[in-house]
Amino acid sequence: MKFINAILDLVPDAKCATSGNEIIAWYDSRPQPSEEEIQAKIAELTAEEPLRQLRQLRNQLLAATDWRMVSDYPGSNQTEWQTYRQALRDITTQTPSLDENGNLTGITWPTPPEN
């Protein structure tokens, strides 16, 4: 999958056939990326993956609390929720990594306020 993602990142909507980690046919009118370009892009995407996953999870947590930010939110702890949401936005200053199973590690998540 990383191989295909690298090709599509280098040549968006590339028209080609792949098998495993190689291009077996190139049907695109644009130049085919070299093996070195593909490997460099794979390394780049691999290095970016922990932060991509972190942002994805953070965005889900923010979306789940959006309703608490409306002006007619009935709770008395809206300020606490604002603080929590800001901590979620700031979480990308941490340095995430992936364990051997591809799970996100090295992150201290903020604790949401009591309902």
Image: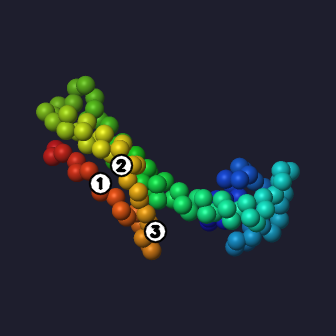
Q: Disc 1 and disc 3: Cα gap in Å? A: 18 Å
Which amino acid does the dot numbered 1 rest on? Trp
- Mark 2 or mark 1, which is nearer the start of the sequence? 2
Image x and y of residue 114, in percent = 15, 46
Tag 2's secondary structure?
helix
Residue that carries the numbered disc 2 in the rendered image: 91
Image x and y of residue 113, in percent = 18, 45
Residue 98 in sight from this viewpoint: yes
Which amino acid does the dot numbered 3 rest on? Gly
Instruction: Relative to 56, say whether 81 is above or below.
Output: above
Task: Choose top left, top right, bottom left or bottom right for residue 86.
Answer: top left
Q: Classify residue 29 as left or right of residue 41.
A: right
Residue furthest to the top in view is 71
Q: Nearer the viewer, residue 96 or 1?
A: 96
How many badges with numbers are in the image?
Answer: 3
- Mark 3 or mark 2, which is nearer the start of the sequence? 2
Q: Nearer the viewer, mark 2 or mark 3?
A: 2
Residue sitting at 84 percent across and 54 percent down? 31
Which amino acid does the dot numbered 2 rest on? Ile
Residue sitting at 22 percent across and 51 percent down? 111
Split into 4 quadrants, where in the image is the N terminus?
bottom right
Residue that carries the numbered disc 3 in the rendered image: 102
Q: Classify residue 110 as left or right of residue 47.
A: left
Residue that carries the numbered disc 1 in the rendered image: 109
Are the two marked residues, 1 and 2, in contact with CB atoms closer than 8 angstroms? yes
What colour scheme governs how the chains and residues are painted in the rendered image of this protein? rainbow
Residue sitting at 16 percent across and 36 percent down? 77
Split into 4 quadrants, where in the image is the C terminus?
top left
